[in-house]
Image (spheres, rainbow, N blue to C red):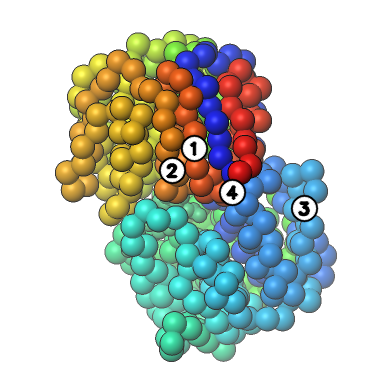
Amino acid sequence: MESFVINGGNKLQGSLYIKGAKNSMLPIMAASVLSSSDKTIDLHNIPDIHDMHVMKKILQSLGAEVQFQNNTLRINVKNLKSYTISDELMREMRSSIFLMGPLLSKLGKVRVTYPGGCSIGPRPIDLHFKGLEAMGAVIREENGSITASAPRLTGTEIHLDYPSVGATENLMMTAVLARGKTVIYNAAKEPEIVDLQNFLNAMGARVRGAGTETLRITGVKELGHCSYRIIPDRIVAGTYLIAAAITGSNMQVKGIIPAHLDAVVAKMREAGVTIKVADDSLEVVESDLHAVETLRTLPYPGFPTDLQPQMMALLALAKGNSNIIESVFEARFKHVDEFNRLRANIVVDGRTAIIRGVDKLYGAEVHTTDLRAGAALILAGLAAEGTTVIRNIQHIDRGYERIEDDLKKVGAKIERKRH
Ligand code: UD1
């Protein structure tokens, strides 16, 4: 087991370069099984994070050849043969479900179990199932094992009850090889959906509309290989911007697409953070933190739920009372108890957290409950007086490539300890 030990209270300075987005990389890795080419798919700007290694292991278990070197993945699926993902691998990561559509499309059959993932409340996959069934899949569930089969998938109109990111991606990946046209209404509009569309089209698919609420997909006979660079991780970028703001620092994040962070920048400005925007960077100049009346998490282009815990850390130190309404996930407030151990003053009432700003946080031992909550505890630790020890940091390694190395580069006092 490993922990982070942070000595808080000092300022950060300099700049950090942001690598590729976890949430783009995972569906794109899954989509690579759709290729019929015997040539290799090259994916660039890939972060060396735990979730990438899990997806790599899953692809290899299906017969794909996958190599990772210097932040580039090389995937060759010419020997892909298995349509079964083991329960052990399914449980390791929720995104394993992304393979359901592509495998069904490519091999006509897929067998999976219910996926695991972060403990942020119930995460059903009914929308994925409904869409696959609408395209002609027959799904059977027996003793926890889910088998879907479809000798031939057919394009259709799908109306999503909610703009689920995962369901939109799974159904897009399924539709690219289905017969005829598929239209997905009320689709998710996240930048990662646009990235997946661009990747699929680079392989020869015909997808348009990503970034709007209607996706139109015309099925093609087969897809080839390509070389593709994934978009920068807007959640890692947002985490580092909040690190700068919470420590009262002047720091820059580079190599990003600032427009992806518009809602975040707006909310941080509302909380008293001065931010400079350039073509491919954002810079926190200074901060005079005060409460925001309401922060509501929403599907894109609203404020992302994946930056809610980090923003809560910031508001814990802002003058006045703030409200955070978590409208995407049912139970994403488990980090509140941990913040309160650092002497924050936060109470939860259903889906609302009421944050009464305090002048100071104080170091203590805390436990990571999930990936983004873990990152948020690091931010709180950087601002707190004294030493903060963060346990269960394997959650953080799922989505941040050695976060301590980045933070040390800009002057943070953070060490990884094995015990
Ligand atoms: C993705 C992101 C995750 C982010 C989330 C919301 C990846 C790998 N993960 O997760 O980091 O927090 O988007 O921005 O991209 N829902 C259903 N039925 C379904 C599917 C979803 O009810 O079939 C509900 C979920 O329970 C949740 C909400 O829809 O309350 C949003 O989930 P969804 O957009 O699907 O998130 P994920 O794709 O799982």
Name the N-terminal-most of marks 3 and 2. 3
Callouts 2 and 1 close, C-beta under 8 Å: yes
SS at mark 2 in the image? strand
User: What is the C-alpha distance between the residues marked 2 and 1?
Assistant: 6 Å
228 vs 34: above or below: above
- The amino acid beneath tag 1 is Ile
Q: Position of residue 198 (x, y in %)?
A: 60, 52
Q: Nearer the viewer, mark 3 or mark 4?
A: 4
Q: Which residue is mark 3?
A: 68
SS at mark 4 in the image? loop
Quarter of the image where the C terminus is located: top right
Q: Residues within 10 Å of mark 4 (few under 14, many from 20)?
A: few
Q: Residue at x 39, y 16 (%)?
A: 273
Q: Position of residue 265 (x, y in %)?
A: 41, 26
Q: Position of residue 204 (x, y in %)?
A: 67, 62
Q: Nearer the viewer, mark 3 or mark 2?
A: 2
Locate residue 323: give its quadrant.
Answer: top left
Q: Which residue is mark 4?
A: 1
336 vs 290: above or below: below
- The amino acid beneath tag 3 is Phe
Name the N-terminal-most of marks 3 and 4. 4
Q: Which mark is residue 57?
A: none
Q: Which residue is mark 1?
A: 390
In the image, taking residue 220 as reference, residue 239 lies left or right, namely: left
Q: Nearer the viewer, mark 3 or mark 1?
A: 1
Name the N-terminal-most of marks 4 and 2. 4
Q: Which residue is mark 2?
A: 367
